[in-house]
Image (cartoon, helix red, strand yellow):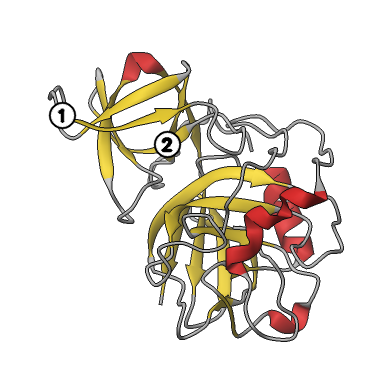
Amino acid sequence: MLRSPLAPHPARTGLRPALAPLAAAALLTALTACSSGSPQEAPDAGADTAGAQEEAGSPPGAEIATVTGAEIEVLAEKGGDEVLETLASPNDFGEERAFLVESNEGEWLEVLLPIRPNGTTGWVRSEEVTLSGTDYRVEIDMAGFEFTVLEGEEEVRTGVIGTGENETPTPPGRYYFTELLQPPDPEGPYGAYAFGLSGFSESLETFAGGPGQLAVHGTNDESALGRQVSHGCVRVSNEDITWMAENLPIGTPVEISG
């Protein structure tokens, strides 16, 4: 889970620039809430398809809304007066604020929010964001300890995962990637990369001074895969998380089941 501000990987929604290391080992405290009490415990974290068109018979791709200003008001109802949240951009990790669009009604967009409770949605004005898209989505099967990345209906990558322990389970639900972080030591216990998720632990209100944000991240201990091992984050191999970092944009939807 993610806590203190951590400089992001330079990837942005719809952009895949060259990979580069990020700053400050001390900032790895941002990742501590994903660790477990097992011997391999560690503070754990947590394609560009903007112009892609749907193929006949294929499911629609995901739409991603990236905030253009310094902040955005999220309303409880379309065109209403109640402000549900005011969210800054960049976010606490220095990443441009992005949302997964659940409904596009022209002037108004219903978006999935990175707040508690998990699954909360709100409405933003379309004029305050730029829209891009992706045909990628990630499906995480906790019962099978497996993830699958799909591009449309095509499976493009699968792998083994580690999930939350019984006392701190990984909560099922619909989420999206909110930031991409790169620990200074790619061979360290955080793995090569960590994607922050829009969801939060449902058993830990806070952890290590942070809000208990979930993440999908690599690991230096592949024996941690295929079992329950974390405080709620999803662990994948370093090879798999590196592939994700090179191919999946911020805003990619993530479905966790099981």
Q: Residue drawn at (31%, 25%), measured in percent from left and top?
A: 73
Q: Residue drawn at (56%, 67%), measured in percent from left and top?
A: 233
Which residue appears farthest toward the left when viewing the image?
Answer: 80
Tag 2 or tag 1, which sits nearer the N-term? Answer: 1
Question: Looking at this view, is 192 or 31 the one in front?
Answer: 31
Q: Quadrant of the N terminus?
A: bottom right
Q: Nearer the viewer, mark 1 or mark 2?
A: 1
Mark carried by residue 69: none
Residue 5 in view:
yes
Question: Looking at this view, is 5 or 156 the one in front?
Answer: 5
How many tags in the picture? 2
Mark 2 crowd level (few <14, some 14–19, many ≥20, 10 Å Cα): many
Estimate the spatial distance between the alpha carbons at disc 1 and disc 2, rounded to whole Å: 19 Å
Q: Quadrant of the C terminus?
A: bottom left
Q: Residue drawn at (60%, 30%), measured in percent from left and top?
A: 14
Reading the image, the residue beneath label 2 is: 99
Secondary structure beneath disc 2?
strand
Position of 152 with respect to 2 (left or right) is left
Mark 1 crowd level (few <14, some 14–19, many ≥20, 10 Å Cα): few
Mark carried by residue 82: 1
Q: Residue 156 in the image: x percent, y percent? A: 63, 57
Asked if the residues shown at circle 1 and circle 2 are in contact, with their CB atoms under 8 angstroms apart, the answer is no
- What kind of residue is marked 1? Glu
Q: Residue 226 in the image: x percent, y percent? A: 63, 83
- What kind of residue is marked 2? Phe
Instruction: Examine the rendered structure and indicate whether residue 86 appears above or below residue 186.
Output: above
Position of 23 with respect to 112 (left or right) is right
